[in-house]
């Protein structure tokens, strides 16, 4: 059976609270770290720069500048410079698959192992699919302090009702402390075959007639359409390498057909934070040294400071990205992409005003900082949203690793947080699952809110000059990312 790379999934019998009898989930309660360690990383596939995807029969091996493997029972030898992404499967010594993730090959080589995915954000949410926990969501990415806490909305594609209940496992698996203010389910029963997709603000949209782009090109005119046209294992990431001219941004133009008279477009996106962009969260915070707590306090107490961080991030194309619409007077920003992941991404709708567009084509422009974004798919839908009925499910029960009842902390967004303070902490959350209405299809979405704080940041003096330059000089953060990457490449070459 080929490995499905559509999403980076954790597949079999996860971690804690593994049920030993139908309908009972209190039998086994072990910290995540006790189950998952030690682990091994196997290379199980590759995406080439020419947009070819290869699934390996077993584990591949990197030797020197070549990746050796077997595919379709034939040996393959792939030069590293032909690879765009290497797919890693993380397993524990018992053979349980914990995660399949695609990592940009350059980041993999300079960082080593699955740590190359440089995960620096968000709890992991696993859905019980009836037989196993499956990695399904990474909520509120980029919310690095309470002042940046935000709501998040995403479909739980693998969640299944078992014995009349839905069950989630929420884990802390990275070096941070995580604070969840709200965790509830939105259940939508709708016409079969009609996808329901959220926007960044919790609005729900029906996608009846999605249209892929007509064309996607970069500033040099290269054809990127195969990478952007569908949700698949072709995920486009640029390396965090500066151009000879010093440029550290990409420029990508997407063109879509525009029906006569269309004034509004539902842009359906599946994008996320790139591997190196995730890594740079820790680097950028580390520049503040022991003064980071003072900065956190300003961020948490002053909404103007939080707003300035969001504005700066979008203007620099880092963890927010302006979507510009081509109009008669030039390019005008009409929407914002919000980063997420990097291990999993969700479909999002951004509603764009295209009333000033003339002609039968809508042109969109993105200018992401190099290495900070991963783009999977874009589509346009011009249909009117169908009416939807949404049932909100509040947790029936929620227990943390100490078996404490934390359900009331997750019931409302009231500033009382359910905490996962250290790696290995987890919570199991269950909901009553109402029966599906006859003749309809169900979409279940996770509505969550919260933030996280990185642990183990440098405790030395702040590099105030560099912090000031990053905040005031255009593209300084992206240049720092390129410099960090270049140093890592040089260190690798010197080994």
Image (tube, rainbow, N blue to C red):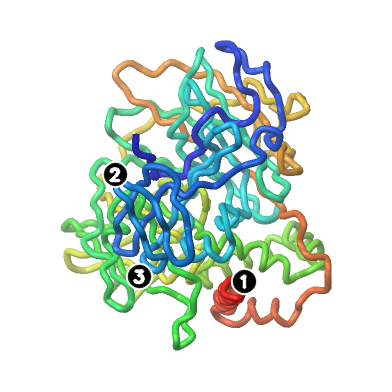
In the rendered image, residue 434, in percent from the top left (x then y), is placed at 47, 17
In the rendered image, residue 35, in percent from the top left (x then y), is placed at 66, 32
Q: Mark 2 — residue? A: 72
Q: For numbered disc 2, what is the local secondary structure?
A: loop
Q: Earlier in the sequence, mark 2 or mark 1?
A: 2
Quadrant in which the N terminus is drawn: top left
Q: Check if mark 2's residue and mark 3's residue have beta carbons within 8 Å.
A: no
Q: Mark 3 — residue? A: 252
Circle nearer the viewer, 2 or 3: 2
Q: Around disc 1, counting alpha carbons within 10 Å, would you say few (fewer than 14), some (14 to 19), or many (20 or more)?
A: few
Circle nearer the viewer, 1 or 3: 1
Q: Quadrant of residue 223?
A: bottom left
Instruction: Identify the residue at image location x=45%, y=67%.
Output: 65
Q: Mark 1 — residue? A: 495
Q: Check if mark 1's residue and mark 3's residue have beta carbons within 8 Å.
A: no
Q: For numbered disc 1, what is the local secondary structure?
A: loop
Q: For numbered disc 3, what is the local secondary structure?
A: strand
Q: Which mark is residue 420?
A: none
Q: Nearer the viewer, residue 38 or 472?
A: 38
Q: Earlier in the sequence, mark 1 or mark 3?
A: 3
- As measured in the structure, the alpha-carbon distance from the residue carrying label 2 to the one carrying label 1 is 34 Å
User: Is residue 277 positioned above or below 11 on the image?
Assistant: below
Q: Check if mark 2's residue and mark 1's residue have beta carbons within 8 Å.
A: no
């Amino acid at each position: 059976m080929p490995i499905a790379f559509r999403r980076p999934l954790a597949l079999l019998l996860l971690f804690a609270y593994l049920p030993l009898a139908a309908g009972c989930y209190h039998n086994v309660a072990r910290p995540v770290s006790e189950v998952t360690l030690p682990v091994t990383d196997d290379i199980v596939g590759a995406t080439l720069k020419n947009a070819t995807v290869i699934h390996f029969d077993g584990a591949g091996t990197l030797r020197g500048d070549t990746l050796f493997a077997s595919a379709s029972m034939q040996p393959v030898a792939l030069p590293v410079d032909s690879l765009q992404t290497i797919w890693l499967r993380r397993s524990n010594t018992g053979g349980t698959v914990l995660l399949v993730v695609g990592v940009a090959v350059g980041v993999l080589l300079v960082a080593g192992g699955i740590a190359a995915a440089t995960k620096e954000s968000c709890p992991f949410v696993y859905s019980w699919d009836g037989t196993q926990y499956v990695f399904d969501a990474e909520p509120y990415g980029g919310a690095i302090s309470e002042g940046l806490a935000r709501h998040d909305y995403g479909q739980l594609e693998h969640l299944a009702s078992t014995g009349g209940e839905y069950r989630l496992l929420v884990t802390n698996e990275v070096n941070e402390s995580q604070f969840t203010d709200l965790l509830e389910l939105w259940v939508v029963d709708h016409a079969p075959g009609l996808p329901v997709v959220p926007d960044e603000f919790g609005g729900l949209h029906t996608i009846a007639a999605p249209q892929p782009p007509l064309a996607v090109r970069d500033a040099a005119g290269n054809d990127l359409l195969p990478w952007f046209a569908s949700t698949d294992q072709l995920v486009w990431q640029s390396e965090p390498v500066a151009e000879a001219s010093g440029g550290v941004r990409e420029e990508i133009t997407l063109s879509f057909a525009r029906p006569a008279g269309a004034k509004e477009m539902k842009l359906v996106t599946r994008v996320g934070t790139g591997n190196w962009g995730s890594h740079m969260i820790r680097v950028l915070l580390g520049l503040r040294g022991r003064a980071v707590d003072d900065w956190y306090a300003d961020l948490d107490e002053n909404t103007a400071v939080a707003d300035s961080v969001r504005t700066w991030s979008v203007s620099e194309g880092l963890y927010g990205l302006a979507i510009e619409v081509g109009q008669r007077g030039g390019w005008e920003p009409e929407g914002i992409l919000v980063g997420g992941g990097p291990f999993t991404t969700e479909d999002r709708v951004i509603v764009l005003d295209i009333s000033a567009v003339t002609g039968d084509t809508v042109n969109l422009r993105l200018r992401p900082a190099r290495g900070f974004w991963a783009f999977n798919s874009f589509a346009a839908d011009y249909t009117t949203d169908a009416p939807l009925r949404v049932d909100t499910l509040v947790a029936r029960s929620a227990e943390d690793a100490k078996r404490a009842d934390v359900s009331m902390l997750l019931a409302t967004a009231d500033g009382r947080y359910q905490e996962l303070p250290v790696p290995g902490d987890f919570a199991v959350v269950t909901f009553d699952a109402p029966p599906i209405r006859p003749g309809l299809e169900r979409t279940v979405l996770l509505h969550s809110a919260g933030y996280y704080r990185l642990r183990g940041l440098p405790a030395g003096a702040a590099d105030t000059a560099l912090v000031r330059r990053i905040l005031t000089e255009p593209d300084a953060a992206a240049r720092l990312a390129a410099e960090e990457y270049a140093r890592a490449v040089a260190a690798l070459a010197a080994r």
